[in-house]
Image (cartoon, grey):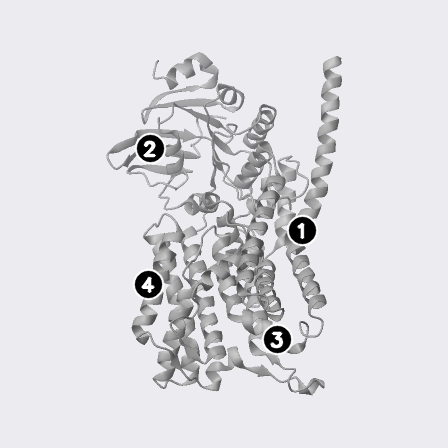
Amino acid sequence: MSTFQNPLLEAKGITKYFGTITALENVDLKVYAGECLGVVGDNGAGKSTLMKVLSGLYKPSSGSLYFQGKEEILESPKDSQNLGLEMVYQDLALAGNLPIGENIFLGREPTKNVGFLKFLDFNKIKELTNAHLGKLKINVKSADQKVEELSGGQRQAVAIARSTAFNAKVVIMDEPTAALAIKEVGKVLDLINSLKKTGVGVIVISHRMDDIFSVCDRVMALFQGTNFAESELSNTSRDEVIGWIMGKK
Amino acid sequence: MKSLDGLWVKNKMEEKDNKKVSLYLKLMPYIEKYGILLLLVLMILVMHILQPDVFLSWRNVTNVFKQISWQSMLALGVFMVIVTAGIDLSVGSIMMLSLMVLAIVAKAGAPWFIVVITPLIAGFLCGLFNGAGITLLRMPHPFIMTLGTLYIFRGTGNLISGGTPISGFTDEVRYLGHGRIDLTWLGLEKSQYLPVSLVLIAVVYVIFWFFLNRSRTGKWIYAIGGNPSAARASGINVNKILIIVYSLCGFLSGIGALILAGRTDSGYPNAGLQSELDAIAACIIGGASFFGGRGTVLGVFAGVMIMGILRNGLNLMDVSSFWQQVLIGSIIVIAVYIDVLRRDLGTRK
């Protein structure tokens, strides 16, 4: 990772109001290819709002987003997906009643034309799912297994697989280990590390210092909706980062 | 070393547990898909044993299909809504309003091909109104919007018709509900005809099976029922899909009105009264889950058939209609309890 190259994703001066409440004020963020940026902050510091702005779910009140150096205006999650910006949500945004493969391709299902009608191509979904899960070394019994039958860690793995199935360039993860059993945390963190190796820029929001210090290269702290501190991971310590979360430098 | 042994034993136990689960998982889809058909076949057998001469006679079987013809349309519409974890209480009123519109247009002397389209358009527009209300007015639950339109649509139907029956349609208008397909060319007797409404049920159900199971929109309907925020995060326009679902539900109610017009030759104020509850009951008996995302078109058809056969069979045996109510109610409760048990077993907590 070199800081000389251009950032993959850059947010400049992001401000977001909800009525009279200021959720974010003049926040900057950068992430480079193959790098993991940790975003920390207390509840209400604006982490989730910032991520929702980056994923196109919220429109910022002011400020601008640059993707590979080009300014982009995101109207919906579809726009950010089209750019290669993917979000893995805290509440594991998967439909439990659908199989793994259909979850991974939800909203972007491959189809085949029969006359003027478009039908879902289940064989292709299965084929692509198996290939993709194999690439990420995620083990499941079958791509046809329903997501509600999976453990928390497997679900998180499916959610991450979902986010990277379409040549994602930046993956944003909101508390990727919060809902997991301890023995599954390691697997998900390994998955994040292998994702970085493929050149993806990863943003991880987490409360857990273990997560931040095992996968991130850089960490930034938000405090009351503003940039509070930022550092290369090698130049800081857990205690210092915990201090930032509480607003102490 | 001891602790390692303990770990090994635990893994062994987990393995065993997994095996049990996998057998269950293998059986699950089949139970989910065909369990209800088993119940249906069982019921047919019991009825046949109790009424060997009448129940499976040509006349009685076609009768059952004629009786369930319009209900099956309402049930299919409500089913799609239930898959999205919604509810439509207004289908009976949509059908009544569509029927009244048809009757008025027919009485005004419009040609038959205009008359038969009017209930479909009226039904579609009613459904669109529901869908738009639920999404644009951000109603806290579809129950409220469709409870409101249950009154609005029936009231409107009475307003435009003056609250009196309008009777007498041409044969073309009555064809779908009343028409007969002659089978004498197969060597059958004249009384052994095929009701057109039976063919219509088959065609509509097959089309909607393809729509729900093989199209992207159909898959998204299930996804919305499974987890609406996941659907939204996937870039699916949830509101648009919901509006489509409620509009189609209204459209199917309009088809129901067209069938009913054929069967009764009349537009009457009490048409479809409480039929929304029958439609919901058929979906629930057929295995659709109120939590959304679960249920099959085949299941709904079985649900409609079970209710139809139960009513028909009990009528044949001269059982009071009060007992019919008690029995149908009991089946609903039992069917939902089975759904609860299934959810306990099928999902990891």
- The reply to the same-chain question for discs 1 and 4 is yes
- In the rendered image, residue A33, in percent from the top left (x then y), is placed at 49, 32
Within 10 Å of disc 4 (Cα), the crowding (few <14, some 14-19, many 20+) is some
Task: Examine the rendering and report whether any part of residue A55 can be seen.
Answer: yes
Q: Quadrant of the C terminus of chain B?
A: top right
Task: Examine the rendering and report whether any part of residue A237 can be seen.
Answer: no
Foreground mark, 1 or 3, reads 3
Furthest-left residue in view? Answer: A20
Amino acid beneath label 4: Ile
- The reply to the same-chain question for discs 4 and 2 is no
Residue B58: which quarter of the image?
A: bottom right
Res A12 label: 2
In percent of the image, x 51 and y 77: which residue is there? Answer: B177
Foreground mark, 4 or 2, reads 4
Placement of B149 over or under B337, stated as above or below: below
- In the rendered image, residue B129, in percent from the top left (x then y), is placed at 35, 61
Quickly name the residue at label 3.
Answer: B62
In percent of the image, x 63 and y 35: which residue is there? Answer: A138
Residue B114: which quarter of the image?
A: bottom left
Looking at the picture, tell me which residue is in the foreground, B181 or A153.
Answer: B181
